[in-house]
Amino acid sequence: MAVYVDAAIWKWAGHRWCHLMADDTDELHRFAASLGVKRSSYQGPPRTSAPHYDITGFERDRAVRLGAIECSREEIVAIFRRVRVPNGKRRP
């Protein structure tokens, strides 16, 4: 199993953000906890179709040091498609 991060390019609230994803949701939660990211920051079904955390560029640097695999935009999209939950996102 692996944990992945893309580039921190998304600007919001004075920070740059990226996605933290993993092959397995339990591994994703364990890794996020090791970064000190609150479980309440988790984004997954039914809110989004792919389990992930949005993390800051600072947290991304720590994630890479802890073993997360750096991914290009194309690679993270492929991972998103691989781990997404079919019919996971509900529309109002």
Image (cartoon, rainbow, N blue to C red):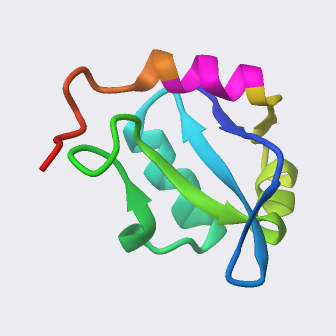
Q: Is residue 59 magenta?
A: no
Q: Which residues are magenta?
A: 74-80
- Rendered residue at 48%/41% (across/down): 27
Left or right of 29? Residue 14 is right
Image x and y of residue 92, in percent? 12, 50
Image x and y of residue 29, in percent? 44, 53
Determine the residue located farthest toward the left in the rendered image: 92
The quarter of the displayed image where residue 75 is located: top right
Left or right of 7? Residue 36 is left
Determine the residue located farthest toward the front in the rendered image: 92
Query: Main structural element of the magenta stretch: helix, strand or loop?
Result: helix
- Rendered residue at 24%/20% (across/down): 86
- Of 11 and 45, nearer the camera is 11
Q: Is residue 18 above or below residue 3?
A: below
Left or right of 5? Residue 21 is left
Q: Looking at the image, how many numbered discs can be counted on the residues?
A: 0
Image x and y of residue 69, in percent? 79, 34
Image x and y of residue 54, in percent? 58, 59
Q: Is residue 44 above or below residue 87?
A: below
- Of 5 and 91, nearer the camera is 91
Left or right of 89? Residue 18 is right
Quarter of the image with the N terminus is top right
The quarter of the displayed image where residue 57 is located: bottom right
